[in-house]
């Protein structure tokens, strides 16, 4: 994300000092979420709280490392161009990251539990703009070492992601 966006806020658990240091070294602002163990909703709300006043938020997940920077930029640009929620779509499947316009700040700040913003997206499905992409990384969730190897093979065999119609 850091190579694609001007500002990156990364949320870490308390006492995750090594990860926090690595993220800072890479150029991210780091927020420690004392409630992180209670679920993704708490972490997301912490990030939004730390960046109130932003024009929107592109919510990336740490376990999805293969998303191409062009895809990140295209999804962010969709919200900057007027969509209120945007996400990439690869092979007719919605992927990650998801971007939210500033109008959703109150709802994002109120998140808790382990669902993250899933409920907000489902309730506002009619506002979701899908950004077509050629990036398999938007669907590759890495939970186990075998997932990482599989993801590396998929990305290596995939052609270079094409530019979105809005990339100039």
Image (cartoon, rainbow, N blue to C red):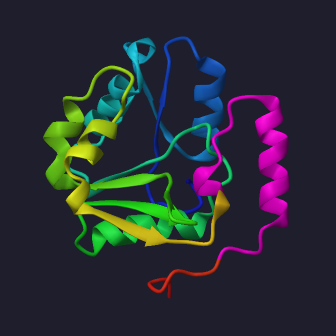
The rendered magenta stretch, by its main secondary structure, is classed as helix
Q: Position of residue 119 (x, y in %)?
A: 27, 37
Above or below 65: residue 146:
above
Q: Position of residue 37 (x, y in %)?
A: 45, 12
Above or below 115: residue 39:
above
Q: Which residues are magenta?
A: 137-161
Above or below 91: residue 51:
above
Q: Residue at x 35, y 35 (%)?
A: 47
Q: Residue at x 50, y 54 (%)?
A: 95
User: Left of 107 or right of it: where is 2?
Assistant: right
Of 11 and 127, nearer the camera is: 127
Is residue 119 on the magenta stretch?
A: no
Q: Residue at x 79, y 57 (%)?
A: 154
Q: Position of residue 102 (x, y in %)?
A: 20, 54
Is residue 149 on the magenta stretch?
A: yes
User: Left of 130 or right of it: where is 3?
Assistant: right
User: Left of 86 or right of it: where is 141?
Assistant: right
- The quadrant of the picture occupied by the N terminus is bottom right
Q: Position of residue 18 (x, y in %)?
A: 66, 22
Q: Residue furthest front?
A: 92
Of 19 and 96, nearer the camera is: 96
């Amino acid at each position: 994300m850091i190579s694609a966006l001007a500002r990156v806020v990364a949320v870490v658990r308390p006492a995750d000092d090594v990860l926090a240091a690595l993220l800072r070294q890479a150029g991210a602002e780091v927020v420690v979420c004392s409630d992180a163990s209670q679920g993704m909703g708490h972490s997301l709300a912490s990030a939004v709280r730390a960046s109130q006043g932003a024009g929107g938020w592109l919510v990336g997940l740490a376990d999805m490392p293969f998303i191409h920077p062009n895809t990140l930029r295209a999804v962010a640009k969709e919200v900057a161009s007027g969509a209120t929620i945007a996400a990439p779509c690869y092979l007719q499947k919605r992927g990650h990251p998801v971007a939210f316009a500033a109008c959703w700040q109150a709802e994002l700040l109120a998140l808790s539990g382990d669902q993250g913003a899933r409920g907000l997206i489902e309730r506002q499905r009619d506002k979701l703009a899908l950004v077509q992409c050629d990036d398999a990384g938007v669907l590759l969730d890495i939970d186990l070492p075998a997932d990482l190897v599989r993801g590396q093979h998929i990305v290596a065999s995939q052609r270079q992601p094409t530019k979105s119609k809005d990339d100039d």
